[in-house]
Image (cartoon, grey):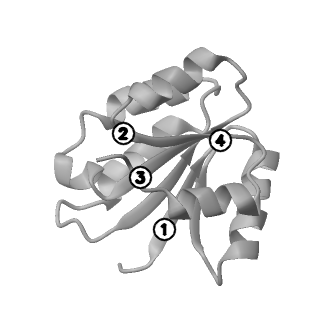
Amino acid sequence: MSATTFIIIDDNVIDILTHKIVLKAKLIDPNIIDFTCAQNALQYIEENYSKNGLNKTILLLDLNMPGMNGWEFLERFKKLDKKIKNQVKIFIVSFSIDPKNEERAALDPYVELFISKPLTKEKLTRIFNFQPAT
């Protein structure tokens, strides 16, 4: 798969719909997969991402969810095979105003960037243009 896939993990279906609208306004026919349950998303990645490294995925992760929250998802994600993890770029998209969440996200090696909701075309441009510090 050469095109970028978007995985949205958010328990709020209105937020998922908003993310999809913004993605579709910015991109032509984006490949979007959404989950309201982080556990189901993790299972999907484990089952559908091979170790051949062909997928390019941007994952939009909410933090505050019932069941497995965003932080718990990240802890489980870290245990996946490195070749699978390298195919996924994680961006936290959250309503959280707690600066500790932003600090924690900045320290997590698998989180590219913390974005506050709502997702907008301008914030999506930040995601596309994001270059991690080297």
Identify the image quadrant of the N terminus: bottom left
Identify the mark nearer the N-term, 4 or 2: 4
SS state under label 4: loop
Q: Position of residue 81 (x, y in %)?
A: 18, 45
Q: Which mark is residue 122?
A: none
Residue 127 position by quadrant: bottom right
| Quarter of the view holding residue 79 | top left
In the displayed structure, 50 sits above or below 100; it is: below
On the image, the x and y values in percent for residue 97 come to: 72, 22
Spatial CA distance of label 4 from label 2 is 18 Å
Q: Earlier in the sequence, mark 1 or mark 2?
A: 1
Q: Is residue 73 left or right of residue 20?
A: left
Q: Mark 3 or mark 1, which is nearer to you? A: 3
In the image, residue 58 sits, relative to residue 13, either above or below, namely below
What is the CA distance from the residue labelled 3 to the residue labelled 2?
7 Å
Q: Secondary structure at mark 2?
A: loop
Residue tagged by mark 4? 10
Query: Which residue is labeled 1 in the image?
Result: 5
| Residue identified by numbered label 2 | 110
Q: Label 2 amino acid?
A: Tyr
Q: Nearer the viewer, residue 41 or 124?
A: 124
Amino acid type at mark 4: Asp
Does label 1 or label 4 sit earlier along the sequence? 1
Inter-mark Cα distance, 1 to 4? 16 Å
Mark before the other along the chain sequence, 3 or 2: 3
Crowding near the residue tagged with mark 1, few <14, some 14–19, many ≥20 C-alpha atoms within 10 Å: some
Mark in the foreground, 1 or 2: 2
The structure residue drawn at horizontal position 48% and vertical position 58%, both measured from the top left corner, is 58
